[in-house]
Amino acid sequence: MDEGKMDENEWRYHGEGNKSLVVAHAQRCVVLRFLKFPPNRKKTSEEIFQHLQNIVDFGKNVMKEFLGENYVHCGEVVQLPLDFVKQLCLKIQCERPESRCDKDLDTLSGYALCLPNLARLQTYQFAERRPILCVEIKPKCGFIPSSSDVTHELKHRVCRYCMHQHLKVATGKWKQISKYCPLDLYSGNKQRMYFALKSLLQEAQNNLKIFKNGELIYGCKDARSPMADWSELAHHLKPFFFPSNGLASGPHCTRAVIRELVRVITRVLLSGSDKGRAGALRSGPGLRGPPVCEASPFSRSLRCQGKNTPERSGLPKGCLLYKTLQVQMLDLLDIEGLYPLYRRVERYLEEFPEERKTLQIDGPYDEAFYQRLLDLSTEDDGTVAFALTKMMHEPTCVMRFVHIHNTATEEGTLSPGWRQERGLLTRENHRHIVRTGTAVPRGPGQTGIKSWSVLMSLSWL
């Protein structure tokens, strides 16, 4: 990409989340990810560059080691002309969801992450012959905590996603509660997985999107988006599944297409697809906690019929869901065990701020940093070193801890509730794309939903 010859008219809005915004090039298979900030909070160009470089280094030196190199695309930090960034910001402003406009695109530093646009892939030149379909899924956290630090009994029975559904509907973020439960998808039981995927399709929220040749054809931006239309989706997908069988339109056709889509996604998610160096997650934690979420509509329906919910069948070790779940389950403490350790480190840094560099709070996220993550000891010796190591086992806490602590030192101490809601609770760790069952790298934050959130995609030609 020639940073010196940038035309804002060649780029279009792709998506955004709480921390970043993404634009895609109209012709080339690349995207740019920009950071976002509240209007009253500015960062220097150097700080923004280091923030983006930390994301690249964390992917390269930590997530590749955990998930395997085929599943991680780190991208690169690029510097763009400021005039281009400012004009681009003006061009896409009208396309942004109103609920996301409380933060502004960084137009002062000129730095962004450049990543491949995997909703289109490099085979886009063949699209006229056979369009590329990409399904993008954000499965969320796939287990219920079993930590002895958890004091709220409900958290031992109901998963975090299902609890948050009630909160998000009550606050108006979404119109209705989704029937999707992550534990059903991660169960490996095909009956439960089918129900989970159909529920995602019925109430996609921001957890499922479908692209055709890089264009969004299914999914929503926020609660103001129109309800998903299965018949319109079936119209797009029918040539992929039933190209010449004369299947008529209407409800029967729609159900048949959706059923075939769910079957294909399930098959790909359960397939092993390693073709390079495997992830180096050494003696990771085994499955723990209840195998069923009591709030899952699938489970509740069976209980009403006097039946037991089929337990997890087990995920094949080489599949995408297994790898993601293993990294998620490095969280052995839950937020209730983690937060006191966070406070221990925070108090220490307030007294000895020069230790931030020694403790690698702000990076570098190198091999030495990764080796510290492999310490799975559980006995608390009361030291800051133990607290920091355990915090790192919350797989995305490292990046979020840097942000939260800097905020605390600049703007005063934040409430524990804010940290629990906005910071250390987030477990989700990476995003992937599968093409005909083969893993292809997926970049952090590519769709701008959340930095290092779990996002799985598949596409076939």
Image (spheres, rainbow, N blue to C red):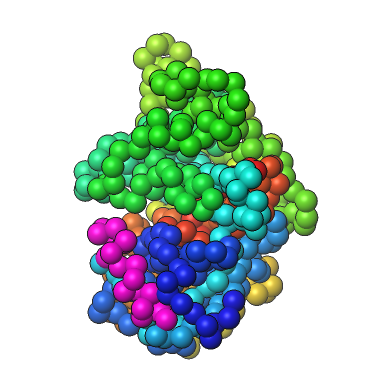
**Residue placed at 40% from the left, 20% from the top?**
251
* Magenta region: 84-101
Q: Is residue 43 magenta?
A: no
Residue 225, placed above or below residue 444: above
Q: Position of residue 292 (x, y in %)?
A: 48, 30
Which of the 4 quarters of the picture holds residue 437?
Answer: top right
Q: Residue furthest top?
A: 306
Q: Is residue 421 left or right of residue 349?
A: left
**Residue placed at 52% from the left, 73% from the top?**
113
Q: Position of residue 140 (x, y in %)?
A: 47, 46
**Residue placed at 43% from the left, 60% from the top?**
14
Q: Is residue 94 magenta?
A: yes
Which of the 4 quarters of the picture holds residue 460?
Answer: top right
Q: Residue 383, can we see it?
A: no
Main SS, magenta region, reads helix
Q: Position of residue 333 (x, y in %)?
A: 49, 53
Residue 49, placed above or below residue 227: below
